[in-house]
Image (spheres, rainbow, N blue to C red):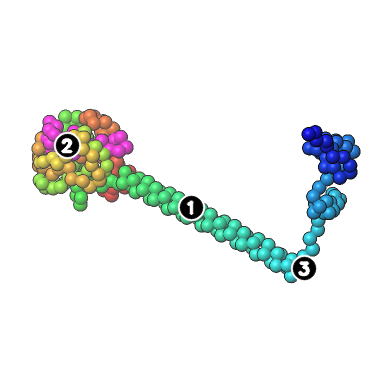
Amino acid sequence: MAFTRATGKHRRPSRMQRSTARAAGVAALTTTGVIGTLAGPALAAEPEAEQTGLLPVVTIGDSVAEQIDAQAAAQKQAAEEALAEQRAEEAAVKRAEARAEAAREARERAAREAERKRLNTFVAPIAGSYVSTAYQASSALWSSGSHTGVDFHAASGTLVQAVGMGTVVEAGWGGAYGNQVVIRMHDGTYTQYGHLSSIAVAVGQSVVPGQQIGLSGATGNVTGPHLHFEARTSPEYGSDIDPVAYLRSHGVNI
């Protein structure tokens, strides 16, 4: 038996017809440009904001403005106070550093003054004594015909002291001088101490004013105990200078 397709207006379109119609409709919409403007109902109903190129202006009440101004003023004041505190701290540090530097300089000046005073302090070779034989006194007792130093009155065993700061360059037997000590002074001059009964220092030793270097005696070429003292420009015999003038020039009262 043969089947025929129904005809009439109530006939349902075939799948191929529906697809063809849909494709044709899309093509038509594309051609007219309508498809590019289609949107959902909610979005289509939303009017687009007008672009004026101006920024929106927000209006606030006076109380809010006052609060903002007060906050800004407080922040400014806090910043100024912090800056002032920082500057005060920096100034305090600088003052402390200045005081420390001044104190350091004062200590250095005091140390220099103490050193200068120490270097320039001189004493008599025997405390409380006096000159019994003058410088350059003439006598056949001395090989040069005159006294190359001065004699200080002293009983045997009297303490003999360095007249100033220096370094011992000779300490031992000195021929006619008996037991002797020769000291190179800090200013480059030399002092000699002769006829000692004993010696209390050694070569190379540093001495200070008033330090014991030996005891007086009668060793060497003498007629009795005393201290023979010389001031020299070198450690050698014959370079003598006036010992009394030398001591006085350094503040020793003789």
State the separation of the CA atoms marked 1 and 2.
47 Å
Residue that label 3 marks: 61
* Residue situated furthest bottom in the rendering: 63
How packed mark 3 is, by other alpha carbons closer than 10 Å (few <14, some 14-19, many 20 or more), is few
Q: Which residues are magenta?
A: 170-196
State the separation of the CA atoms marked 1 and 3.
55 Å
Residue that label 2 marks: 202
Q: Amino acid at mark 1?
A: Ala
N-terminal-most mark, 3 or 2: 3
Q: Is residue 206 visible?
A: yes
Residue 34 in percent (x, y) is at 87, 42
State the separation of the CA atoms marked 3 and 2.
101 Å
Q: Indicate the secondary structure of the residue bearing disc 2.
A: loop
State the residue at coordinates (16%, 35%).
Answer: 171
Q: Amino acid at mark 2?
A: Ala
Disc number placed over residue 238 in the picture, else none:
none
Residue that label 1 marks: 98
State the residue at coordinates (85%, 36%).
Answer: 24
- Which of 162 and 106 lies nearest the eye of the viewer? 106
- Which of 29 and 89 lies nearest the eye of the viewer? 29
